[in-house]
Image (cartoon, rainbow, N blue to C red):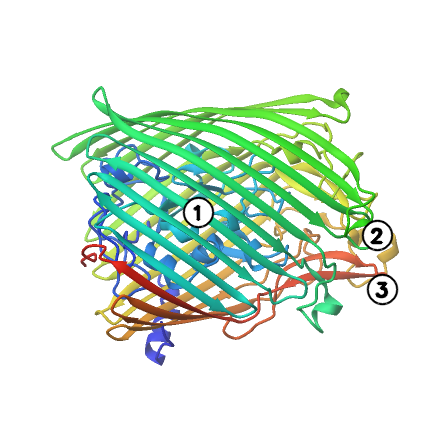
Amino acid sequence: MACLDRRAALAALTAATLASVGLAHPAHAQGRNSARSPTDTASAAAPGHGARPRADTAVVELAPLEVQGSIIPVAAPRIGSGVPARVQILSRERIEAWEPRILPDVIAAEAGVSLYDDLGAPSKLNLTTRGFSAGPTVGLPPGVSVFLDGVRQNEADAQEVNFDLLPMEHVRRVELLSGTASLLGPNSLGGAINLITDRGEGPPHGEVEASLGAYGEYAGQAAFSTLARGWETYVSGGWGRERGWRDATSARQYNGFANLGRTGERRGFRVQAFAARARARTAGSLPESIFALRPATNFTAGDYEDLHTEQLSLSGYAPLGPGRASLTAYARRFGAERFNVNQPPDDDVLARTDNRTLGATADWRWAASESGAGLALRAGLDGAASWVHARIFGVPPAGADGGEGRTLTTDVRSPGYDIAGYALADLRLGRATFSGGARYDLIRIPFRDLLDPAEDATHTFHRLSPRGGASLDLGGGASVYASVGKSFRAPAILELGCADPEATCPLPFALGDDPPLKPVRATTYELGARRVAGALVLSGSVYRSEVRDEIFFVASERALLSGYFTNLDRTRREGVELSAEGAVGAWLSWYANYAFTRATFESPVAIFTIRSEDEFEDSPLAGENDVEPGDRLPLVPEHQAKAGALLRATPGISLGLDLRWIGRQWLRGDEANETAPLPAYVVANARAGVEVGPWELAATVTNLLDSRKAIFGTFNENRRTGELERFLTPLNARAVKLTLRRAIGRGGEEDGG
């Protein structure tokens, strides 16, 4: 990709102001040297490797085989193509173009998506979309669900998502469903993300890749793919390491992945297996006094996370009565060791978690159409059983290296389950499609305290989550939709075990049987429209989510590094998302979008913060933090604008630029909005690529301007000075990465336009 000329840059940036809204559905573009899959829809990508793909000119329509594993809420591949939702589908080319580390890097350019970093590591970013969060931080209230080929990746202990374990190197498509995802179960309050992985296709072919980057980054990957005698085979593996740009930080990852299957028009099956391990030494946030002088400093060196996961799944489909049935069964294991260094004289904390999950989803679909009308029905069962074992140790600072003197403070087991049934229907009458459905969940979360069996308890939650909507094809490439849906989230084991203000939990949370929390409930209303005119696609939506009993972490008045979870009465998210994308001939493709997100408290509440401590009453940061309706939730930027373009200068050479402006956001610990927010910042990324035969050399530069603005903030005492300060995490430093890729064999015909 390349720097834009002035006219192209102006067009890309001003397109964000186009007053148009709708359902975006970019094409299913394939990566280079890949065969066209029989499951892909007939759609086209904007020209150029790494281009942002052009939206399909038809309504959302999935091929019959591709429906399995997708999270798009349709009752049938074609009858339900008027799905009333905002869906973005990112192609393989888009994913490969910027050589992303983790999923947040892939979707960061989408309207309404922002990132923040409270752990101080490039591989540990959290994301927010429409004011709801997902990420690896244990204790972060999860509001977005993440799937891999339809298998949930939110972990059973705290519903966190460990992005550095997901097999991004083997993903061919990403589905981003914004707004309520009622039919996808718990955590889908603000949306859902699904990764569709590579499958064997074409004659035997493969690819090898090596990369080298700043701060000691180097990585390698190899993949093999084939379709022979009806068997689809895809096998791949990769590894990577880096030193890290902040002091005493580093990261390394290993992964292996395999897909084997036989698929046909009527029946088929697939076996998938993957394993990954990731270890990272993190830096966390810094007192502002140090941040201003040297943002690369590691204030409490020694934090680390050592994670691993293994997953095996079996899926298949076959005719059943007048319709088609499918089944996906899976087994997952996740293990974590996390060490958190605190400021002396507080103890450090070592946490070990082991999660095991068995689950399955059974689905049945039927559809019929005649004379411009159509009806589709879908019903299914979804269930998972999990076994969680969490242990937490207090480690005196002097024993941090050797672990001497550690004390077991928590030893908890929780064998729980979630059983659900769902049904939905789509009715098409001429140009109008009416959709409706519901899901019922029954969730049981036992709490077994191995240190004090008298604290044992069991929590049960159940909820019906309905959803309905309608869409209308206006002709001429224009369509509109409206929808309303309810969703909910049961409290995580971590939250249930740390909900007593009289017995607060030392971070990262020592658990006990505490007063039960209420489940989070959300109702989302949305209106949208879409216009396709040749290569130009204009889309967007207007939404409001009313949330009841949101679970929120409150710091403790009794101890600096402890707190508890509680329910808030009412909160709200509302906003507008506008986007435009297009192409100029075969030489330029571009996109631009704008998002306004207003995330607010809607009921008064007093939230304790260290800013209200008497010893800091003379500090300019002091405040009572008494929240009133209308105060903004922390770490949700109100305004975002993004734009980018790809220029294919000559055959085989591509240049590009990506720009993101993220507005100001309030700090955690200032829910009453009494201090200054984090300022707005700009991130620029650039790319250049050269292809010669089977070889490709790509150079990417992230944070081109080397901005060190803060993307996370909270408040704490600097124990070295005794002063109350803002604790901030900087943007990752500018980094250059070179990637050399070699295709081996022939993957079949490239996709046509």
Q: Give x and y (percent) for residue 28.
A: 28, 51
Amino acid type of disc 2?
Answer: Ala
Give the quarter of the image for residue 439.
top left
User: Label 1: few (<14), some or many (≥20) within 10 Å?
Assistant: many
User: Label 2: few (<14), some or many (≥20) within 10 Å?
Assistant: some
Q: Give x and y (percent) for residue 19.
A: 35, 60
Disc 3 and disc 2: Cα gap in Å?
21 Å
Q: Secondary structure at mark 3?
A: loop
Q: Report if residue 272 is visible in the image.
A: yes
Q: Secondary structure at mark 1?
A: strand
Choose between 546 and 241: the one closer to the eye. Answer: 241
Q: Give x and y (percent) for residue 268.
A: 25, 32
| Residue position marked by numbered label 3 in the rendering | 721
Q: Which residue is drawn at the image coordinates 58% and 62% (left, top)?
A: 664
Q: Report if residue 80 is visible in the image.
A: no
Q: Secondary structure at mark 2?
A: helix
Q: Nearer the viewer, mark 3 or mark 2?
A: 2
